[in-house]
Image: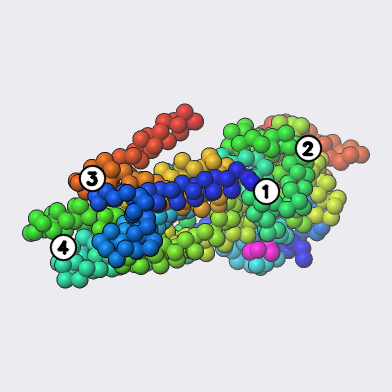
Amino acid sequence: MAFVCRDVTVNRGSTPVVKSVSLTIAPGEVVGLIGPNGAGKTTLMRAALGLLPFFGSCSLAEMPVSSRARYATWLPQDREIAWPIPVEALVALGRTPHGASISRLSSQDAEAVRQALEKADMWAFRNRIATQLSGGEKARVLLARALAQETPMLLADEPIAGLDPAHQIATMQVFKTLASDGRSVLVALHDLGLAARFCSRLVLMQAGRIVADGRPVDVLTAHNLAEVFGIDAYRVETADGLLLQPLGLATKT
Amino acid sequence: MTAYVRLLFGLGLLSLLLFVISLLVGPAGVSPHLSLSALIFGDAGPLSLVMREIRLPRAILGVLIGAALGLGGAAMQGYLRNPMAEPGILGVSGAAALGAVLAIQTGLTAAFALALPFAALAGAGVAVTLLLLLAGRRGGTLTLILAGIAISALAGALTSLVLNLSPNPFAANEIIFWMMGSLADRSFLHVALALPFVALGACLILPLGRGLDSLTLGEDAAEALGVRMVRLRVLLVAGVAAMIGGATAVAGAIGFVGLVVPHLLRRAVGAQPGRLLFASALGGACMVLAADIAVRLILPDRDLKLGVMTAIVGTPFFLHLIYRSRGQG
């Protein structure tokens, strides 16, 4: 079982927002999904999970709802926490696909919750009320919730937006560790510098299509940056990989 | 013993206590000891009849209807993720009231005693069918709320129309008093009528706790956590409609219980929507039993209506909710 999408097309009304996209992700990969606003990144991920009607085929969407929840985790972009519940109970929601009730956790579930809270650096906040945290702290609690689900596949939509630099790096590091354990991660990102440093592979979308797919150094070319994002960047290839710093808007030629 | 179990135990004990007090309050003014022995052992006299045929069904209905309103309120708030939601938002109680009003107006109630609750149940049935057609398979929470508002508005307008055109002032009077909600002069026939609907609704809703917990993260995340949203919505709407339809059919419209009880208990259950379900059912039973005792103690010979009492007691709590949420702004 792996992440395989073939010819996925999603329509909003009569407008296609994702156009015959095919994407395969293997275990051990951290795939960064990049592209300007409205390129179809979120829509593609939601369709892949079966949360949206679409044309084409996708391995996750074909799974029964309950087994999918044990195979893939979804971390949406809108950081919704509807009720003032304790952080630990919120993170424990990640254990529900494994048959846990957040009111009664087995020792195995409790251990998964503890590890997830520590990975997201939120263990010290476990007894706080989740709705009273800052925006970045809420994002980390929700990341912990996703990690507690302990699935082979994680799909995260802009998980590092609004985090401080240390926690942005720590989050990307967590994804890298997951991949080294043989899991796979698909993460939508806008920080191209971090995408270049931490993703093993980048998928670049523009207007509903995949326009580039490969190693960061091959995807984040000066040409693609200018054509797709409309920016100029300082890029240098080092022994550690590509370093990239956006400089300004691309000059139209 | 966890805090949650202690809370349930305490609420259970309180509702038992209020149940017994409810049995002991009445115009006959007999000593508690005599009353209870007449209830349990029977004295073949009028006291036994009063206890078994008047006070016992009244107290049982207090528990049933309170539990239905509390559970229905907690379920609606959990599903809509909004502390201002209440079971009436679905329009089922309004439609049930319309059914009852039509039964009174057309004189069916005079011909056949149980015509009123049956007509109310029919009204509730029409409303829930409409709701599920409009917002069952497709459409999210917003469709459900809008459909509920539309059904309530239509039912309210038609009820007013009946009153407006009523040629019979006695029927109009009866309608107005019925709509205020009461548990007075109910019999075991009413218990038998409400019980299956309340029990069915509770059986549909209580297992949804885990899904409602997951909804704390939003519909998308909940669905990815394995919650089947369409199934949840249909079961929840059907369950709330069965309970509220059954409750309204025998007791009329009793407001504010479904709104206030989940709000009062939310903090005590750590705001977990799943835990709030059972706690609110017990809390609702306590509130309705207490209000029904109060109406008999405050104005023993004026037939103060239960729905009036719950609204008068409930409004300050509601204002408190507004006051507090204003602070969180």
**Mark pair 1, 2: CA separation:** 21 Å
Task: Label the magenta part by its dominant secondary structure.
Answer: helix
Which residue is identified by label 4?
A: B105
Residue A170 circle label? 2
Q: Check residue B155 in the rendering and tell me which mark sits there, or answer none.
A: none
Mark earlier in primary sequence (1, 2)? 1
Instruction: Report the residue marked by disc 3.
Output: B300
Percent of width and height locating residue B220:
58, 53
The answer to whether residue B143 of the structure is visible from this angle is no
Q: Residues within 10 Å of mark 3 (few under 14, many from 20)?
A: few
Q: Which callout, 3 or 4, points at the residue further toward the start of the chain?
A: 4
Q: Are marks 1 and 2 on the same chain?
A: yes
The quarter of the picture where the C terminus of chain A appears is top right
Regarding mark 3 in the picture, which secondary structure is present there? loop
Q: Nearer the viewer, mark 1 or mark 3?
A: 3
* Front position among marks 2 and 4: 4
Q: Nearer the viewer, residue A230 or B241?
A: B241
Q: Quadrant of residue B45?
A: bottom left
* Type of amino acid under label 1: Ala
Query: Of the residues tagged 1 and 2, which is closer to the observer?
Result: 1
Instruction: Please tell me whether residue A67 belongs to the stretch shown in magenta.
Output: yes
Q: Amino acid at mark 4?
A: Gln
Residue at 54% in and 45% down: B7
Q: Amino acid at mark 2?
A: Ala
Q: Residue lying furthest top in this view?
A: B327
The residue marked by circle 1 belongs to what chain? Answer: A
